[in-house]
Image: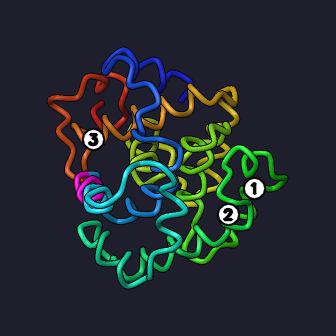
């Protein structure tokens, strides 16, 4: 699987950081994107910004009543649950005055994030990689599916998949951001639940297509 990055890069060209937004927005959207598509996340952000500038976003959301926050993020689905999860995360950030640069330097930051109710490994790692630019690899369902189809690697545990990437790639923020983005883009384009192998640009290297 060491060739995966080069194959995807050749097929799709650079996607760069991929996850859009400021660091503050990424912290928020990492929770909002759970079990939904990105357009719904954008609609939720649009609701938030109807009466709010982009300044001090985290403080603003922290001060909102949870019911009102839930109403704002309704387009993202599971809005009552996500509002509580977001509030839990914001309460943690409040302990450090929402200063992301200070929080980035905390020891065992990943473990601290994982102790927050509603923040799982994928959400925590998305925040670490894209908001804090710490070199951790984000594993999602697309990643597991692609590894199984292309290389016959059938791993179900998050940590096992993540370790595989650490073994095959240097821990580099830009590389991990782009590789994760390329996997998502490829999976959305052709390597879907019902794959469109006839349109796949890297099918010659895929065990499923051979």
Residue 100 is situated, as x and y percent measured from the top left of the image, at 66, 48
- Would you place residue 124 above or below residue 91 in this image? above
Label 1 sits on a secondary structure element that is helix
Q: Is residue 79 above or below residue 133?
A: below
Whole-percent x, y for residue 66 in the image? 44, 82
Question: Which label sits in the foreground, 1 or 3?
Answer: 1
> Dot 3, crowdedness within 10 Å: few (<14), some or many (≥20)?
many
Label 2: few (<14), some (14–19) or many (≥20) C-alpha neighbours in 10 Å: many
Q: Nearer the viewer, residue 150 or 28?
A: 28
From mark 3 to mark 2, how far is it between C-alphas?
A: 31 Å
Q: Which mark is residue 113?
A: 2
Closer to the camera in the image, 13 or 2: 13
| Residue at the (54%, 54%) spot, across then down | 155
Q: Which residue was labeled with disc 3?
A: 191
Whether residue 30 sits left or right of residue 10 in the image: it is right
Q: The magenta stretch spans which residues?
A: 39-43
**Which image quadrant: the C terminus?**
top left
Side of 36 relative to 172 (left or right): left
- Name the residue: 25% across, 22% down: 201
Which of label 3 and label 2 is nearer to you? 2
What residue occupies the far right of the structure in this picture? 107
The residue located at (44%, 82%) in the rendering is 65
Determine the residue positioned at 35% across, 65% down: 35
Q: Is residue 45 left or right of residue 97?
A: left
Query: How much space separates mark 1 and mark 2, taking CA atoms?
Result: 6 Å
Q: Residues within 10 Å of mark 1 (few under 14, many from 20)?
A: few
Residues tagged 1 and 2 counted as in contact (Cβ below 8 A):
yes
Element under label 2? helix
Q: Position of residue 176 (x, y in %)?
A: 56, 33
Write down the residue under mark 1. Answer: 109
First of labels 1, 3 by sequence position: 1
- Residue 174 lies in quadrant: top right
């Amino acid at each position: 699987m060491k060739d995966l990055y080069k194959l995807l890069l050749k097929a799709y060209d650079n996607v760069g950081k991929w996850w859009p937004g400021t660091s503050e927005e990424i912290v928020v959207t990492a929770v909002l994107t759970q079990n939904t598509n990105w357009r719904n996340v954008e609609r939720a952000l649009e609701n938030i910004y109807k009466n709010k500038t982009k300044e001090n976003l985290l403080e603003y959301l922290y001060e909102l009543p949870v019911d009102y926050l839930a109403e704002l993020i309704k387009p993202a689905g599971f809005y009552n649950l996500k509002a509580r999860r977001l509030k839990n995360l914001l309460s943690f950030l409040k302990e450090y005055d929402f200063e992301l640069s200070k929080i980035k330097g905390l020891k065992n930051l990943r473990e601290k994030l994982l102790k927050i109710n509603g923040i799982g490994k994928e959400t925590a790692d998305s925040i670490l990689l894209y908001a804090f630019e710490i070199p951790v690899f984000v594993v999602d369902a697309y990643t597991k599916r692609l590894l199984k189809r292309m290389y016959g690697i059938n791993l179900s545990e998050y940590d096992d998949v993540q370790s595989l990437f650490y073994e095959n790639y240097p821990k580099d923020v830009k590389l991990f951001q782009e590789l994760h983005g390329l996997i998502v883009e490829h999976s959305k384009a052709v390597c879907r639940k019902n794959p469109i192998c006839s349109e796949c640009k890297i099918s010659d290297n895929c065990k499923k297509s051979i």
